[in-house]
Amino acid sequence: MASRKKVLLKVIILGDSGVGKTSLMNQYVNKKFSNQYKATIGADFLTKEVMVDDRLVTMQIWDTAGQERFQSLGVAFYRGADCCVLVYDVTMPNTFKTLDSWRDEFLIQASPREPENFPFVVIGNKIDLENRVVSHKRAQGWCHSKNNIPYYECSAKDNINVEQAFQTVAKQALMQESEVGLYDDFPERIDLKNTDQKPKQSDCAC
Amino acid sequence: MEEPLPEEFDIILIGTGLTESVLSGAFSRIGKSVLHIDQNKFYGGNWASFNIKDFDEFIASGGIVEINRKEFDPVALVTEDETFIPVSSQRQLIKEGSLICNLRKNKVTTASPKDVEQNQVPSPKPTSDNDDTTGSQEDQSLPTKIPDNSAPKPNAETIETNESLPIAEVTEDDNKSCGENVGDNDAETKTEEPPFPVAMKDEVKQTYKFPSFDEFYDQWRRFNVDLAPKVMFSRGKLVELLIQSNVSRYLEFRNVSRTLTLLSGQDYLQPVPCSRADVFSSKFVTVIEKRILMRVLTLCANYEAHPEEYEEFEDRLFLEFLCSKRLSEKAQQFILHSIAMVKETSTTIEGLKATKKFLQSLGRYGNSAFLWPMYGVGELPQAFSRLSAVFGGTFCLRRNAVGLVLNTESGKCTAIIDSQGQKIKCKHLIVDESNVPDSYRCEFASSVSRAVYVTDKSVLASDKEHVSLITLPPDGSRGSVRVIEAGPQCCVCPSKYHLVHALLSSAPNNDNQVCNPREKFKEVEQILFAGHADAEVPQGGDAESTDDAKPHILWSSYFDMMEDGVTRDALPSNLYVARGPGMELGFDKTMGEARELFERICPDDEFLPRAPDPEEIVFDDEGYNTESNGARVEESPEDGAGADYVDDAEDLREVEDGDDAPGQVDHVTRIDQSQNVFIDFAKFKNLNEFYKSCQDDGFDC
Amino acid sequence: MEITKLLLAANSDYSSMWNYRKNAFLHLKTLKNEDEMKSMFDNELQFIESCLRNNPKSYGCWHHRCFVMLHMMKPNWERELQLCDLFLQFDERNFHCWDYRRFVTNHSNVPHEKEIEVTNKIIASNFSNYSSWHYRSKLLPQVYPDPTDSKRIEEKKLLEELELVQNAFFTDPNDQSAWFYHRWLLGRGDKEQYIVSLIVNRSPPSVFCCLRKPVKMFNGTLSVDDTTQTVDWTSSMSERYSHLWFCKLEDGFKKGQQHTVSCEVESSKLSCCLEENCQKATVCLPINREMFQDHTSQAKLSVLEDELNSCNELNDLEPGNKWVMLTLVLLMRAVSPKQHSEKISTMLDALTEIDSQRKRYYLDLRSKYAIEDCIVETNLNENRLNISGMKLTQICHLELVPTLTHLNISHNCLQNLTVPFANLFCLEVLEANDNKITNISGLKDVPNLKSINLDSNDISDVKQFEYLKTCRCLEKLSIRSNPVCESEKQFPTTFLLHFQ
C-alpha cells in the first residue's frame, strides 16, 4: 500500500569547512546565495517538502553549525540520520581527500543499522569556479568504490544541479525509511496540536 | 594543517559538561563571542554518555586524557605584567574503576550476519590525521576479554586504572578471523569454567541463551552509558529551560514510566504508587491504604494552603508527620524514599517541599514525574553546545588549556594558553572542576560511587519496556542507593539488554568504610540480580527458582566519581568553576548554577531567550540579509578575531507566529525505525492534572 | 470539492459542507471505477483525520468518517480502531470517539473481550471517565452474562468489578464516574413482572389491573369464572408506560351472582372474587421489601455486606463525603432497611446539611423510604394507609396501591399534591391536613373521592379548588386555617359541595 503518510527525513551534510555546505542548503531550500564566505552561524536545519514518487516527504537538512571546523561534531548530531550528504570543493583537493574520513566518521558516530547499505550522496561543489582541481573521473571513481554512491557536481552559486542532487538525497533517504509500515508509525501521524485543554476532572462525567 | 583559533573571545569555556554547555549556549545566544574547548574527544566531560568501547577505554584511563600537546614553553608567551598559572591535564576524574564481563568467548557461529557486517565498518578517526592519538588507539583497542573468568577472585578481575585493560587485545579483524581457532580454544580451554553458573543452568533448560562475549561487543555502538545518570523533573528547571530556549528541538525523551522500591524486610522490588492512576491500579496496597495515601499526597501537593495540617510537625521529622496521618508503614516508606526521596532525618518542611516538587511534575508528560533523555544524559550538553554553535560559538575538542594567564596587577584572568601553544584572550573564563589549576584545589569534598550493569532483562518483568527509577532505602550499614534502569527503546543499549545504573554517595574520608566501589554494591546486586557480578553465586540448585526471574549481570563496571575540590574564594574574579553532576537526582541545582553564573557575568541580559526556528529566519535578496549579518562572523582566518559582531543575534528577524512559512514541521519529534513514541514538548501541555482536587458536581447527569 | 475541503479544514463543524461532499461521493461512485474510488476514499479519510486533529470533537467529521467507511469496498477497520485508540489516548473522554469506536467494533466483529481489555487500559490510565465505564457496562454482560438475566453479569465477574470500582472510589471518593458504575453493578436486573392488585367493578363491568412494572402495552389474559374474555386493555393514564391498566367487560357480570375474575401475565396470576351482593371487589398481593430495593437486590447479600463494610471504613476515613454517604444509605437499604433505619435517617439528615444544594433530593429520598416502609408493614387488603407524621416531603408509590379507600398523609411537610391521585380509583377519604400544601393539582379526577381534609395548609389561591370539580363524588372539603380563608372572608371555612 502506497501510504500517503507524511514522512520526516533527517539529512545531514558533512564535509570540510568552506566547501559550501550551508550555501548548498540555502540554495536548495531558500533559493538564495551569498558570495561572502562566512562560517556557519544561525544555520541550524532547514526543512523542505518534497514529492518523491507520489509521496510528500518533509526533508530536514541539518547543518554542521560550524562544529566541523575543528573536528568537533558531537555524536548527537548524527543520531537518526536517514541520509548523509558528503560535500567537497572541486577546487580544493584536500576537501576531497577527507571525504573518506567523513564517511567513516559518519558510520562510526551514526552507527546505522546496515552500514554498508546506508545511503550517501556526494556533491562536488563550486564547479562555477575556474580553478577546478579534482576531476570528475576521480570523484566518480571514489564514489563507485564506495558501493556506488550517487555523485553530483553542483554550484550553489549558479544553482547548478542542486535541485537534482537533493532530489536524489530525498529518494535515498526515503528508501532507508521505507521498511516502516503504515501501522508502525501510525502514532506519529496523529499529533493533536491544539488540544491541550483536556477536560478537567471536575467536568461532568457523562 | 589545522587552522589556528581566533585570538580573542568574550568568553572561554573549558569542559563541555552540562553547566558549561548551557552557559556556552546562553552567551552565544546573546551575541557574545564564545570559545568552547574540551580536552576530550567527546562532549560532556563528567556528563558524557559512551558506547561500551569508549566507556571501557574511559574506565581504563581513569578519565585521564593524553592530549596531543605541542612542545612549547608556555611561560615564554607571558608578558612581564602577567602571571602564568599551569593547569594539570592529568587530573583523574574517576577512581577505583573496574570492569567485569561475564560472557563467554564466542563460538564462531553465533554472531548474526548483521553483527558481522557491522564489524566491517571501518573506524578510523575523521578528517584529522595528525592531532588525535587517542583516536587511533581506539581503533585497535576493542576490549575483549577483560577479566579472566577462570580466576574468579574479586580482586583479580579488578582492573585498576591505567593498567591497560585488554588482557587479550584483539582487533576487530582478528576477532573474526580467529573465531574458529582462537575463539574455540578460548572457550574450550581458558574459559572452560563456566563464567556464569546460572547461565549454565539456563542452557540446560534451553530457555535463554546468553549472548557470547563477541556478540555483546559486536554491538558496542548501540550502548550509551552515562557517567552521570539523572532524570528530569517534568516541571524542573531543565525542562522549562529547554522549552523556553527552544533547545528541546534537538532532543527526544521518554517517560520514566515507573518507580520501584524495596520495602524493608522484603527481598523483591515493587512498584511505588505515585500517581492517582498508579494508586488505583496498585495491587500492593489495600483500598484503605489507597485512600490515606491519596489524602496525604493531595495534602502535600498543596500543603501551604493547609498549615493546620503540619504546623505542629514543622520542627519535627517528616517521618513523624507521615506517621500522624495514619499512613501504613509501607505507605510511609513509599513517600519518604520514593516520592519525596528525602532522608529519614529530614524535617517535615523538607519532606513536604520535596513531595510537592514531585507531585507538580507528575502528569505533565504522561503518568510520570520524570523524563529521561533518549540516548542518555550525554545528549543534553551536546544540545546546548549546538545552540551555541548555531549562534556562532567556536568549538574545539581535543584541546585544553595548559595554563591561565593572570594580569599580575588586577589578578584577573586575561587569557589561556591552549595545548597548541596559542595564547587566547578572554574577558571571562569558565572551567569545569577537572580544569581548575592545582593552586586553587583542595581535597575532594566527596565522591559518588557508581556501578553500571548490562543485564539480560529488566529487574522487574512487565509487559512493556519501562524506564525505571529504583530507590533502595538505606538498610543497616548500606546507605540509600539510587538505581536507574533503561532499555533499548531509550537507545541506551541494544535490544535484549537492559542498562542499569546504580549510584550512592560516599564521604571519602570515612574510615573503616568499604572503599572499593565494587564492594559497596554487593548488597544491591543481591537484591536486584541473580548472583553477583564476580561469579561468586552459590552453585547449588536451590537458588534457581527464586532467582530465576531476576536478571543476570552480563557486564558490569564500577568507579568512583570525584566531586568538587575547589577553593572558590581564591579564584580570580573572572574565573568561574562549574560544578560536576554530583548526586542530585535531577538538574535543578545545575540549572540554577548556570543561571547564576550567567547573571553574574551578564546581569542585564536575558538567559537563553527562545531561539527562532529555522523557518523564522528571514533572508532578504542579498542572500544572508543585512540584519542576520549581525549574527554571522566574517570568517577570515588571518583576521581570526571572530568576535566582530556588528549586532546582536537578536537581530535575526523572527516572523510572527502563525506565519504561513512553508513546510512548518514538527522538529522536536523525530521517530526512528524503532517505533517509539516520543514526547514532544510542543504537543502536550498539561495532559493530566492529576492532583487537582475535584470539585463537587451534581448528581444530575 | 476543493472548496468544501478548504472550508472544512477551517471549520469542520460545517455540516452542510460535509453533506455536499457526501453527495459528491455518491455521484462519483456511479462514474468511477473501484480503484479510483478507493484512492478517493483513502484521501478522504486522510483529510477527515487532519480535520479531527484540529477538532477532535466535531460531529460532522466523525459522521462523515462513518459514511466513508460504509461506502468503501474494503474498509480497513483495524486502522480505524487504532485511530480510536490514539484519539482516546489523547482524550479518553471524547464520547464522539467512543461512539465511533462502537460503530467500528460493530462493523468489524472485534471480540468484546478485546474491547474490555481496551477499557481496562483506559481506566487504568485515568478512571475518571464515565465513557469507558459505560462502554464496559455494555460489553461485560455480553461476555459474562448472568445465566438468569442477559443484561446483567455473572457473579464471579461482578465481584471482580466491584473490587475494581472499589479501588477507584477509595483512590478518589469524589469521582462520580466510579460511583455511577458502582451503582450500575449493584443495580438489579429486570424485575419479574407480576400483578400487584386487581379491582373488579360490577357496574359498569370493568377490571383494573395494577402491575409491578410499568409496561407500554398490556396483554394480560383475563378470565371470568375460568372463561377467557376478549378485552381491550387501556392504560389508565396517558403516560407511555403505565402500571395500571383498565378494561371493560363486554358481557358484564350477572346481577347477584358471585364471580371469580383472574388475570394472568407472564407467570403471575391473581384472582379476585366478586361476592354476590358486592358492587366491587379488590385483591392485593402483599407488597414486600423486594419491591422497593431498586438499586441493589440481585447481588448476594454477603457481597452487599462486604461493600457496606468497606464503605463504612471509607466513611470513617473520609467523613462527610456525600458520595460515600449516599452509597452507604443505598447499601443499608439494600441489606437491611429495618436494622439500619436509624443510621439511614441520620445519614440522610447529615447529607442534607453537607450537600445542601441537593437537600430536596435527600428529603424526598427519605420520604420515599418512609413510605416504602409503611407500605410494607401495612396490610393492604384493609385498604387503608396511614403515612402521617413522617416529615414527608413527597408522596410516591401511589401507583402500587390503587385499592386504598383511606389515605392519611396529614402532619407531614408536603408542599404540594401534584403527583396524580387519579389512579386511586377506590380512594374515598384523603386526610392531608397539617402540611404546607399550596398546590393540589394532583387531586384531579379521583373518581370516588368523597372527603378531603386540607386544614392547616398554605393554600392561598382559590383557583386551586377548581381541580376538585373533577372529583365527581366529592362531598366534603375542609380547608380551615389556610391563607385563602383569610383573604376571602366570604368563603365558608367548611362547606359541602354537591355536584348534581
Image: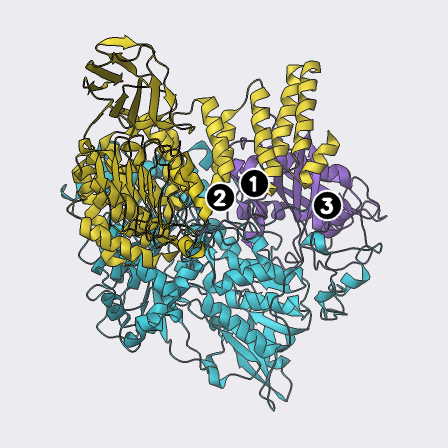
**Front label number (3 vs 1):** 1
With B243 as the anchor, is C213 left or right in this view? left
Whole-number angstrom distance, CA of label 3 to CA of label 1:
25 Å
Q: Which chain is yellow?
A: C
> x, y (%) of residue C91?
49, 44
Q: Position of residue B241 (x, y in %)?
A: 55, 63
Percent across and percent down for residue B542 are 13, 42
Residue type at mark 3 is Pro
Kindly indicate which chain is depicted in cyan in the rendered structure.
B
Position in image of residue B210 (x %, y %):
31, 39
Residue identified by numbered label 3: B662
Q: Which residue is mark 2?
A: C91
Residue under label 1, please give it. C56
Q: Quadrant of residue B25?
A: bottom right
> Could you say whether the residue bearing mark 3 is in a helix, strand or loop?
loop
Closer to the N terminus: mark 2 or mark 1?
Answer: 1
- Does residue C163 appear anywhere in the picture? yes
Disc 2 residue type? Asp
Task: Give the drawing colour for chain A.
Answer: purple
The residue shown at (39%, 45%) is C125
Pick whichever, A120 or A83, lies toward us.
A83
User: Is the Cβ of the residue at disc 3 closer than 8 Å to that at disc 1?
Assistant: no
Would you say the residues marked 2 and 1 are in contact, meaning their CB atoms lie under 8 Å apart?
yes
| Category of crowding for the residue at label 2, using alpha-carbon neighbours closer than 10 angstroms: few (below 14), some (14–19), many (at least 20) | many
Binning the other alpha carbons within 10 Å of mark 3 as few (below 14), some (14 to 19) or many (20 upward) gives few
Residue at 76% over, 39% down: A163
